[in-house]
Amino acid sequence: MNSGAVVTFDRAAGESLPVRVASPSRVLAESTDINITGLCKTFDGQRQVLRDIHFSIPRGQAVALIGHNGSGKSTLLRCCLRLVQPCSGAVSLLGSDITTLGARQLRGMRAKVGFVFQRHNLVARLSALTNVLHGVQARKKGPRTWFHSIAPQKDREEAMAQLHSVGLANLAERRVDGLSGGESQRVAIARALMQRPKIVMADEPVASLDPLAGDEVMGLFLHRIKDEGLTLLFVSHNLDHALRYADRIIGLRDGRVELDTPSKTENLATLRELYG
Amino acid sequence: MGLVVFTAHALHGTELSSLSLMDIAAIPANILRLIGEMLPPGQVELARIVPAILETLQMALVGTVLGVLVSLPLGILAAKSLSPNRLLYFSARGVVSFCRTVPDLVWAIFFVIIVGLGPLAGMLTLLVDTIGFAGRFFAEAFEEVDSGPREAFSAIGASGGGTFFSAILPAAAPSCINTSMYCLERAVQSSVILGLVGAGGIGMLLEEPMVWHNYPEATTVVLTIFAMLVVVEQLSGRIRYHILAN
Amino acid sequence: MAKTTITEPGQGGLIPPPRLVHPPLWQYLLGFALFAFFLVSLEGSGLARLTFADVLAIPSKILYVLNQMFPPSLERLGAVSQAMLQTLEMALIGNLLGIPIGLALAILSARNLTPHPLVYAISRLIVTFLRTTPSIVWAIFLIVAVGLGPRAGTVTLVLATIGFCGRFFAEAMEEVDPGPREALAAMGASTTGGIICAVIPAAMPNFINTALFNLEYTTRSSAVLGIVGAGGIGIELMVSIKTFHYDEAATIIFMVFVVVMGVEQLCASIRRRVMQEG
């Protein structure tokens, strides 16, 4: 596993970065949260979207995936949760390879990963609090996870606290189709955190927001991630966001990893030329 | 082209083309004669008409409520995006189509044979009717639900039941309520004719005057039916509006 | 945009909203009354009177009927097919004649197009009356007016079509964006011109959808009109059931099933094509 140039590079990068490791006593292999080896994806048997992707992300690191439209970054992220089925290669999350898991185990693994979509994907006709509460379905089943009015008091309080942590406690009872884009995305973040995830993935979480709201939501998002010491992998087409919020930047082009660098890099100019 | 030929044949087949001038001339007179016979509406004792209306409404309500309860799981199985496998999908579709395409009077006759004369046969007919109608439209409503929240729930790792009750049902609820209320209206409307084959309801009052050509009495019953249907339509419109507004 | 304060989760003083927002008292009472009526209806509809023995007897009765129905008899296949064809023809003619009349009534009874409130009220009443009175009842009356046979059935279906299309065409035209019509009016076009050039084209996909539903609906009902002697396959069905020829009835029911399914599939594929273009 620790052979190959990419991995060595990662470790070098990891040491030079201000990475927060949740429990420093753990051995290295265990503190690698995401490890992708030889990942390929071909659509319709011909369009190659991902070609032989390798990288790994240690616990607590925030990584931005950047690239132009059609470079395969969204597909890569979806492959990491098997929302899109990869053609070959392995994706191991928290030490287990999700490409070999059965349906039930896959659900269990997805439960440990919070996912924030580009469009918030909330259930429009329900209240913000109920939408956040739905995150509890990552570890529970049954009617008491469907609506906040019948949920256990503990879960309701936790959902409320999550809403509060994204600054929306006062909108708990409002239906989400009446919320603004930024507010909706914050509810979606709260829902993902309600899962009590180990890893969070986000697919251009602020791309559909105006720049001001986007900055605000992104700042809040990263604050919450760092607070909880979570590992983050997010897709962005905004190089400034990547530089500001990520510890490390992975650039994709035509389905290949073209660049893998700490965000505190010296050759900013090259980066801007490539992705700005 | 084929349609034109078929239409021409159809004009012949429905005996419209063989209408002579004499026949056409006779129609207004016939209608006037009929109206003359129908008016003034005859007297029907309240003691017969009120229980009949009540029975009609009860058959319609129970048939619709039970039918909707059966249609929900059938609708899930008959929705392409939710059905667990193709066999269940096609069998659910088949059951729903069969319930819908066999005319309700045929169902009524069948149930009269099975459970005997009376409102139970009518209620079962309306239940089957509702399954045929609601099963189809529930399935369509489930299929049309935005796929985004569903994807979010599979990313959470939620169970199938959780996804359905938290993401799909809330989104499809307005459409389902609409369909259910429409089913209730339809049930009241068709429960009127079930009485003709002895399956209970106000139609029973219609059969006798029809057989004996007692048109004034028939007119009274028809006007009563009309009034009842208008009231039910208005009521269901109100309820629909109230529920959907929230 | 208001700046939000960020706080740690789990801090005290966060009370979730109440589980239930109490609706007003009358809604409680209404709900309770409806539920009570439903319980009473269980009794009234005869369901509650079913004894356990009755329920046990049902499967054997169903088996008996099914046993009588199979194998379906093909003896009178010719006559039955003829009647089936007539049924379809009644439905087709009923639609072809009813849809134009329905459209005319719909224009009079659309709130935004009606020439006069009185016309609106009257045409609306006519449409409602045509729609809500069951087609079997129409058929019974029309048999007296135009005599036994498919003519009565066809006219019945014309009336049913007017009732159905009259309502939904009017709703479709009320929903149309008023902009184009105003533009035409500003150019000095006549009211009729505005309706034909602006309103009808915009509502066309909706019209076609309604008309196709009506075709499905009338096909189904034309299959039963024969029961009262208004033409079509219904009479064959009634006779075979009344004379306990269940095997013949099975053939007819199966034929109706196939034809109605066929019409539904046809309508579905037309609908898909129209929706794709529109």
Image: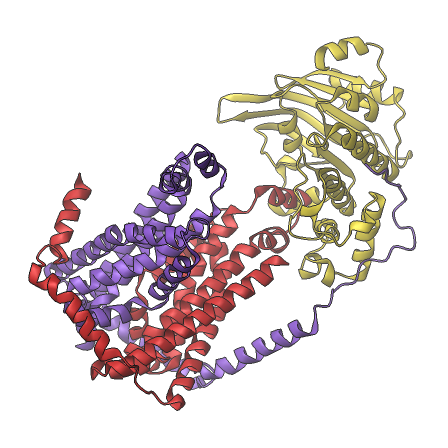
Chain colours: A yellow, B red, C purple
Residue C254 found in image quarter: bottom left
In this picture, is B48 found above or below C15? Answer: below
Q: Is residue A119 left or right of residue B94?
A: right
Coordinates of residue A154 in the picture (x, y in percent): 82, 58
Left or right side of A77 for B236: left
Residue B226's quadrant in the figure? bottom left
- Residue at 42% x, 74% y: name it: B228
Decide if residue C277 is in sight here: yes
Between B34 and B132, the one lying in front of the other is B34
Q: Position of residue A240 (x, y in %)?
A: 79, 21
Using the image, determine if residue A169 lies above or below residue B68. Answer: above
Residue C77 pos. (x, y %): 13, 60
Residue C229 can be seen, yes or no? no
Which image quarter is the N terminus of chain C in?
Answer: top right
What residue sits 68% from the left and 40% below the top? Answer: A120
Horizontal side, residue C232 vs residue A68: left or right: left
Q: Quadrant of the C terminus of chain C?
A: top left
In the image shown, does A112 or C87 lie closer to the viewer? C87
| Horizontal side, residue C212 vs residue B38: left or right | right
Judged from this view, the residue extending furthest toward the front is C188
x, y percent for residue B203? 33, 78
Check the image and report above or below for A248 versus C170.
Answer: above
Is C171 placed above or below B42 here? above
